Structure formats: structure tokens, C-alpha cells
Amino acid sequence: MGMWFRFRRIALDQLCKFKLSNYALAIGLAGIAILFRAVLEAIAPGIAYFVVLLPAVVFAGAFLGTGPAIATAGLGFFAISILFLRAALFMWPPFNPVQLDAVIFLPACMAVIWATYALRTSVLAAQLAEARLTEVFRQIPGAAAVLEAPGGRLLMRSIQSDAVLGHASKRMEHSDDLVNYGGVHSGGQPYEADDYPIVRALKNGEVIRAELIKYRRPDGSLIDLEVHAGPVRGADGRILASVGMAFDVSERMDAERRLQESETLYRALAVRLRAAVDACALGIWEVDLSTGRIHLDASFAAMLGMPPEPIEMTRADFREFIDPADKQRVVQAFAGAAAQGSIYADEYRMRTCQGDVRWIVSRGAVLADVQKVVGIAGDITERRVREDTLKDALQARDILMHEADHRIKNSLQLVISMLRLQLTGVSDVHLKQIIGETIARVDAVANAHLALQTSPDLRSIELDQMMKDLSGSIGLLNSSLAVRCDSKTGLWLDTDRAIPLGLLISELLTNALKHAFPAGEKGEVCVETRSDTNILEIVISDSGVGLPAKPSRTGLGTKVIATLAKQIGANIAVESQPGCGTQITIHLKLAKAGMSALAV
């Protein structure tokens, strides 16, 4: 029953694939078989019908399909059935050939049809599998081929072969044709046919994996091929064919060459960096922001008094080495740099394993893509000791200079007091004038040293305060005259110019008090200062009688003024008319080489 149901399923399946020409041929085969049976009956009576009909069923099943085979069997069974009925009506002896046909024919046809169907199905499946394999092989993304043994005839070739090798597919029909292809040995000689891996696999049974060869395409371009090849053997071990595949790996090889060059350069840079770091006695550190682990190289470990070998620790362990006075500041500075992705730079104290305090300078950069901070560190303890020693020495020098200026100022004040005491006992007018001028000059120097005592660095003097002190002191020389000062420059002058400038102004003010006003006449002398980025301008004016038409230039005061102006590089301009007063203008370049003026 199972076979009957399977036969029925096959019949229905084949009827769905109905093709009239095949059925016509099948009916024709059945008719020819019946006629042939009739001819044979005349020659050799008693031959069974299925002897001639079964071959027709087999032929129809093999070449026309299962449906036509069923039609052939059905027609034969119809003919046998008619003969069987005729034999039954005429009461033929039992077990005659017609009865045998009727009994055997139908099961035999079902068996034949089933066998041919299974055979056709197997053949079609094999053909389909072969077609699929062929198509898959043709679609390999590279140059691929199959050569038949032993002659080397080309059996199969991938579609991409032309694109990879640059040759037309019809150019190769046999392994000997490979001599026309572009394989190149390292020495520049072209490949012979037997040099190619697929031929070596065919003739020698070699298995070639990832062999790199240079290949020159017809357009002259040179590419890199990665070739795989191997033999296909039968059950007895005999080589039946060989398979070869080649892939264009030029881009990969170029990338690998660039990578190798980069690695070589990186290694050279790493060696140079390590040499530079060692030469500068620096250590290298690395902080993993994701795990909090810190890696120290051997040099940094040695700075902390540990064995000179790379070490790893937690951030908490590292903080224990930082001096307590600097710990909070260092932690905050590092956290801020890591959060902002900026450069980290700091100097701080660390305590070694032996308890010694060492000054460390550290600088690092944040690598955001790998969540790390990498930097270098150096021991600057000796430098900091020298700096502290120098700072102490400078502080001591400043104290000594301050004390020296104080003593000089006091000494000059003592000289001024003695000169003023001497002045009270002098009756000669000319001598009094000389002593008064001397007092003014000494007082100018004393005022400069007084200004130095209030200087923040003992190397510069506040110009405005010096001018006010100087004007006040000169004004005491003549109670009938007023000396007014208007100075708001906000400048600090170095002592190399401030003291000579003070003496110069003192001389000019003294001359104004001496010559501008007749004895007993009241008047005013004004001192004004103005400045821009490059020029300091000091104007000394009076409302006196003015200069004579031909003023004398042979006095000591005149020589002192010229000498002081030349010393500081100042220019002096004089404007005066008889009876209209005098104005003297001093121009001083603030940016003169070797000198400086600081704006506050």
C-alpha cells in the first residue's frame, strides 16, 4: 500500500508537469511495442507482452519523464486487459501467457517507473549540485581555476579572473598557456608555466597556502597576488585535478609595508625618547582613568626610593608618597586637567620610602581616546635647593642694600645739616650762594636714596614721589618763592637714570631760584611731568625776568647740567624772553638701550 500511495503521488506530481509532446512520444512507444509484440507472436508464439512493453516504459521514464512512462504503462495495461478479457471469454486454458501478463505487468511497471523516477531525481540533483558548485566557483572574488589531470586542460574559471589578472578568459585553454601570463620572480625573470602554484599542485601534488607572488598585468601595472592551490585526489589517491585561487592583496601589502615602516619609525622614536629620558634623568608615568591604576617606569620608581624596576600601584597608594602640604593642591590640579583634557604641569614634594623629601616636576597630556594620562617626571631637588639658597641670598642682599641706602641717606642728611649750620655763620653773599647750591645737590642725592628705601626691589625709584620731595626741599632755600610740582606719570625709573635726573632737576630749580627773580621779589617756579609710551617730558618754568640776550655758559651749574643730560641721554630745550619768564623742557627716552622704566 505504501508503494501504491507513493506511486500515486509521483503520478500527480508528473501530471502537473504536463508536456504534450512527451506524452505523444510515450503513446507512440507503447503502440510500437504492441505492434512489435504482434510480429514476435507470429515468429515465436507465447511471448509475454510485458517483455516488449517494459523496455518502452523504461525508455519513456528515462528520457521523457515519469508522467509519459505512466502513460506508456497505462496503454500497455489497457491492451493486456483486453487480451485477458478475450481469453476469459473463450475459456482459454489457465495460466496462459496473457494471464501471466495481467498479473505481472502492473507491479513490474510500478517498480520500473519508481526506479526511473529515483534515477532521474538523483541525476537531476547531481546536475543541480554540479551547477551550483560551478556557479559558486565562478563567483569566487578572485582569480580561480580548475585544471584537469593529467593534461592540464582548463575545466573551470571564475568570473573575476579577467578583472584580477587583466587577461581575457579565452586566452587560457591549457596549463601551458600560463607562460603568457605575468608572474614575476624576485629577480625579475618571468614565470614559466610550471612555476605557477596550480601547475605544481597538478603535477607534483603540492599544497600551496598563501604564497605571495608579483604579477605584471598587460597594462604594465605590478600587483601583489596571494595564491592558494592544491590537488583534487580520487579514492585511490590519484590526482584528478588541481584547484588554484589568487587574490589581489596589493592594498593590504601596501598597508602592511606602511605599517611596518611606521612601526620601525615608532621603535626608533621610542629608542630615542628612552635615550633622551634617561639622559635627562626623567621618569615616565601613566594613569589609567578607567581603572585608577598608575604605572611608573624604573626611573620614577628609583626617585621614590624603590627598586629600579617598573611598578604598578593605585592612585591612593601614589598619593601617600606626596607631601601632605602639597597633596590637596596636586590632586585638584590633576583632576582639573583630566576633566578638561588639558596639559597637566606641576611641581610638588614627595617623600621617598626612606622618608627623604624630594622635589618633583611633573608634566603630562590626556589621551582621551584611550582614557589615559601619560607624562614625565624629574627630580629637581638640587635645583630647588639652589633656588632657595639664591632667594635667601637675594633677600639678604636687599636687606643690606636697604640698610646701606638708609645709612647713606642719614649720612647725607648729616652733611646737609652741617652745611646749613655752616651757612648761618657765613656773611659773604657769594659764599652763601655756593654753599646753598651744594646743599641742594646733596639734598637731591639724599632724596633719591630716600626714595630707594620705599622701592619694592631696591633697583627703581618712583618718579612722582621723588619729584615732589625734591621740589619741597629746593623750596626751603628761598622762603619768598613758591615751588609747585605737578607730577602724575605713574612711572618707576631705574637708579641709573633716576639719581642723575634728580641732580639735573635740582640744578635747574636752583638756577631758577637764583637768577629768575631779583632779591626780595616774590614769584613761582613750576615743575610738570608728562609721559607717553616712549618719552618722558619734564617742564620747569618760572615767571621771572627771563634770561639775558647773551646768557653766560661758563658757570659750574651749566657744566653740571650738560654732563648730567648727556649721562642719561636727555635733550634740553630752553625758551625765554626778557621780562617774560623762562621754560626749560627735558625730553628723556624711556626705551633707551640698557635702561628701563616700569609703569605702575
Image (cartoon, rainbow, N blue to C red):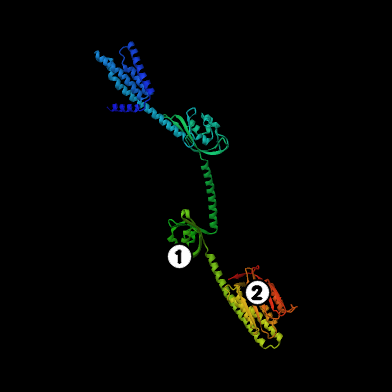
Q: Looking at the image, do the residues carrying marks 1 and 2 touch, with CB atoms under 8 Å apart?
A: no
Quadrant in the picture for the N terminus: top left
Above or below: residue 406 compared with residue 173: below
Q: What amino acid is at disc 2?
A: Ile
Q: Nearer the viewer, residue 86 or 281?
A: 86
Q: What amino acid is at disc 1?
A: Gln
Q: Quadrant of residue 530?
A: bottom right
Above or below: residue 319 compared with residue 494: above
Marks 1 and 2: which is nearer the front? 2
Task: Provide the secondary structure element on which disc 2 rests.
Answer: strand
Image coords of residue 162 (percent x, y): 52, 34
- Residue at image position (54%, 54%) is 273
Q: Nearer the viewer, residue 349 or 75?
A: 75
Disc 1 designates what residue? Answer: 328
- Name the side, left or right, on which 590 lies relative to 128: right
- Residue at image position (52%, 44%) is 255
**Sequence-wise, which precedes: disc 1 or disc 2?**
1
Mark 1: give few (<14), some (14-19) or many (20+) Cα within 10 Å: few
- Name the side, left or right, on which 232 lies relative to 101: right
Image coords of residue 108 (percent x, y): 31, 21
- Name the side, left or right, on which 554 lies relative to 180: right
Disc 2 designates what residue? Answer: 538
| Residue 297 shows up from this direction | no
| Residue 509 shows up from this direction | yes
Above or below: residue 29 compared with residue 389: above
Image coords of residue 525 (percent x, y): 66, 80
Label 1 to label 2: alpha-carbon separation = 53 Å
Quadrant in the picture for the C terminus: bottom right
Task: Provide the secondary structure element on which disc 1 rests.
Answer: helix
